[in-house]
Amino acid sequence: MLFNSYTYLLLFLPLVALGFHLLRGSKLRLSLGWLVVTSLIFYGVWNPNPEEPWSPKYVLMILASCTFNYFLGRKLSALKHSQPGKVMLGLGIALNLGALAYFKYAGFLADISTHLTGWPGQIAEITLPLAISFFTFLQIAYLVDAWKGLTEEYHFTDYLLFVTFFPHLIAGPLIHHREMMPQFARNKHRGLRSNDMSVGVTLLALGLFKKVVVADYLARTATPIFDMAAADGRDPTMLEAWAGAISYTLQLYFDFSGYSDMALGSARIFGIRFPLNFHSPYKATSVVDFWRRWHITLSRFLRDYLYIPLGGNRKGPGRRYINLFITMLLGGLWHGAGWTFIVWGALHGGLLCLNHAWFAFRKKMSLPKIPTPVAIGMTFFAVLIGWVFFRAHDFHAAKTMLASMFGFNGWTGWPPDSMMAVKGDRALKPIIAGLVLCWFFPNTQQFMKRYLPALGLREFPELRPGPRRWWHWRPTLPWAFFTLAILYGVGREFDKVSEFIYFQF
């Protein structure tokens, strides 16, 4: 089920909210149990076969995964810091990663084997269960913390909800048990509240606008140009390639930002606040800063459960750079089974190493900082090059796009209406509008910060409490009309449902 569908917005979400409110007075955990059941329905409605509206085997799979990890976590908590517990932890992590590897990487590994050995390595097509990358990482973090003695004896219903709660289940954020379990305990007897409803609906409206009006419009330029690069016909010209690369860079920004807002809004309706996952990454002044702002919860997981266990920065700069590179390489592989994702991860790993080396050199030589606009532009350019690999159908298509961008496949003069793949004005105007929005406007968290739309806002100075601005959102009638105006704009473009990009991971 998609967040940006009539089924979700007009049927599923209102019914779930109503049931949650009606069950709030029960002495049992009925309201939380209701959220578990409806979350499993939300998950089960997804099916790669359009002729089957329900996929119980995937529901059974996620239930089996939750049951196994919950009871293993209880056992690890009893064996915390012990050697037998450490062995058991290793086996648990191996089983979780083994399941992920089978569903996500078996075909890719078979292709590599065939290429290296010449032996037939094809295997039957394996359907990737929705969100397996997310709920696998989430539960690995729980197991590690259980062995470290950082978990409590959570109720099984709370644990099921922690893993399956539908606002985060499909594409994050990667929530943490220490953030969620106390909120579930507080909210098990609490119904809906008007403030939470107002904040939640506004976040949903903003996210819908970003996805339906902005991201999907930019896709009309990005998709045909990347498809052209993957085809055997004419290669994109220089202007076409740049239009496609910038359009996709902005499409991904507004698609993921829109999803993040809708996830926050859906959870907030039930009084639950998720951790901040997206904070104006294209305003970053370095690649290090970019990863503090883009997919923040994934960066946190990779830092806490991979980079630091590898040694972090405790063993000198050389080892630090190796650990950074390995972490980002595996982060790229987490996104997808393909060489383009591996190259994307390696590129960001190399850029992070260069960034840290530059910071150390600048400090040692007492050099001034690069001017902020220049630093933002350089970071944007580096990230954009990485997105070419991230989006391209394969490595050949990525090379074709980059060759076209740097003039090796022909150059077309100005004005941009000389582009043949897409109409020039259809490409240029959305690009300018998108750049203005992401560089010069406040983001959702700044707009709504007085009502704490997410956890972790204090990590950024601009999101901390401060003087009220005229543009800060408040639950008042004028702002209600603003939300209705946004929904009206969404309705005019709501003719075709498209998946969020991060659903594929």
Image (cartoon, rainbow, N blue to C red):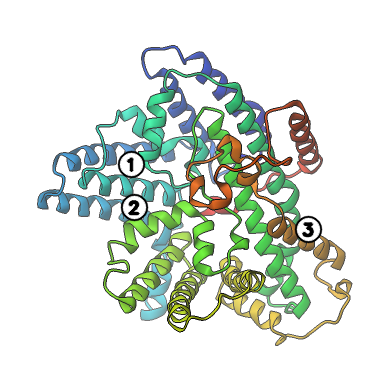
Element at badge 1?
A: helix
Disc number at residue 112?
none
Q: Residue at x 69, y 57 (%)?
A: 438
- 3 or 1: mark nearer the eye: 3
Q: Looking at the image, is mark 1 or mark 2 earlier in the sequence? A: 1
Residue 172 in view here = no
**Disc 1/disc 2 C-alpha distance (Å):** 10 Å
Disc 2 target residue: 99
Q: Residues within 10 Å of mark 3 (few under 14, many from 20)?
A: few
84 or 446: which is nearer to us?
Answer: 446
Q: Residues within 10 Å of mark 2 (few under 14, many from 20)?
A: some
Disc 3 target residue: 433
Horizontally, residue 134 falls left or right of residue 445, namely left
409 or 367: which is nearer to us?
Answer: 367
Residue 228, quarter of picture: bottom right
Amino acid type at mark 2: Ala
Q: Looking at the image, is mark 2 or mark 3 earlier in the sequence? A: 2
Q: Residue at x 22, y 41 (%)?
A: 72
Q: Residues within 10 Å of mark 1 (few under 14, many from 20)?
A: some
70 or 77: which is nearer to us?
Answer: 77
x and y percent of residue 448 in the render? 63, 40
Residue 482 in view here = yes
Disc 1 target residue: 65
Q: Are the residues at dot 2 and dot 3 in contact (C-beta closer than 8 Å)? A: no
Q: Looking at the image, is mark 3 or mark 1 earlier in the sequence? A: 1
x and y percent of residue 161 in the render? 40, 32
Amino acid type at mark 1: Ser
Q: Are the residues at dot 1 and dot 2 in contact (C-beta closer than 8 Å)? A: yes
